[in-house]
Amino acid sequence: MVLMEALLKLPNGLLWVGALLLVGGSFGGCTEKEQAAHEEAIPEVSLSLPQVLILGDSISEDYYPHVRSNLVNVAETHRPKGNQGATWDALSDLSEWLGSRKWEVIHSNFGLHDIHRSTLEEYEANLTQIVEQLKKTNAKLIFATSTPVPEGTPRFVKGSAEPYNEVARRVMERAEGIMIDDLHSFARAHPEYQRKKELHFTDQGYAALGKQVATSIVRALDESSDGKAEASSLSSP
């Protein structure tokens, strides 16, 4: 069974949790059809695949499922729950987010929340510290530029992400060896993907952003593994 195969691959500390799910042959009284759906949804655990960490705000939270689906059998992707917020949050929580896992690629973005919480000088100083900590992981680093602020967005001024993206580019260039995933330019080239007067995107927009992020991750894996990474499921959104 798919479920049993997945359970056997779980770390020992989690195996007993999975075993409890099997007691009585059901998931808390689910029907056989619902149980089958649960089994099919359980991802295969494969520590032999490259480990990828994604960090960012609620926009990354919404495109993350599309990144994950695009990288099936290419990489095992992870993202902390919720919104990683501004650079101030990363300075206090980054060690916890990184954990002890060996990361092959780390794709991150901080910026939109800093518009209200950080001056450009503070943002630069904070981002510099974050990059220094990320580089200690020896992972291939990718920084995503912040997506556009459209006209009419409540509490934001149109174009207010651009100065922060300029600072971020300067920090990444100074750090050397960090890829830029220019989600800002990608979104500006496809205005139909972004909701009117909102920071967030349509379902199609999140699918497109997820594909873009997955493509940048594959490129990073290619660079670190002599071109052996291959995303077989990078289809059009």
Image (tube, rainbow, N blue to C red):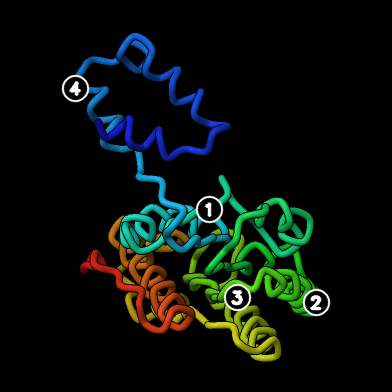
Disc assigned to residue 125 = 2
> Is label 2 in contact with label 3 (beta carbons under 8 Å)?
no
Q: Assess disc 2: are there few (<14), some (14-19) or many (≥20) residues with their C-alpha within 10 Å of its C-alpha.
A: some
To which residue does mark 3 refer? 160
- First in residue order: circle 1 vs circle 3: 1
Q: Label 2 to label 4, Cα distance in Å?
A: 53 Å
Eye-nearest disc, 1 or 2? 1
Q: Label 4 to label 1, Cα distance in Å?
A: 29 Å
Q: Label 1 to label 3, Cα distance in Å?
A: 26 Å
Q: Is residue 233 left or right of residue 75?
A: left
Q: Label 4 to label 3, Cα distance in Å?
A: 49 Å
The secondary element bearing badge 2 is classed as helix
Q: Label 1 to label 2, Cα distance in Å?
A: 24 Å
Q: Amino acid at mark 3?
A: Ser
Horizontal and vertical percent position of residue 79: 53, 53
Q: Can I make out residue 107 in this image?
A: no
To which residue does mark 1 refer? 79
Eye-nearest disc, 2 or 3? 2
Q: Is residue 217 left or right of residue 37?
A: right
Question: Residue at image x 24%, y 67%?
Answer: 232
For the N terminus, the quadrant is: top left
Quarter where residue 177 is shown: bottom right
The secondary element bearing badge 4 is classed as helix
Question: Residue at image x 69%, y 66%?
Answer: 114
For the C terminus, the quadrant is: bottom left
Disc assigned to residue 33 = 4
- First in residue order: circle 2 vs circle 4: 4
The secondary element bearing badge 3 is classed as loop
Q: Label 2 to label 3, Cα distance in Å?
A: 19 Å
Q: Amino acid at mark 2?
A: Ala
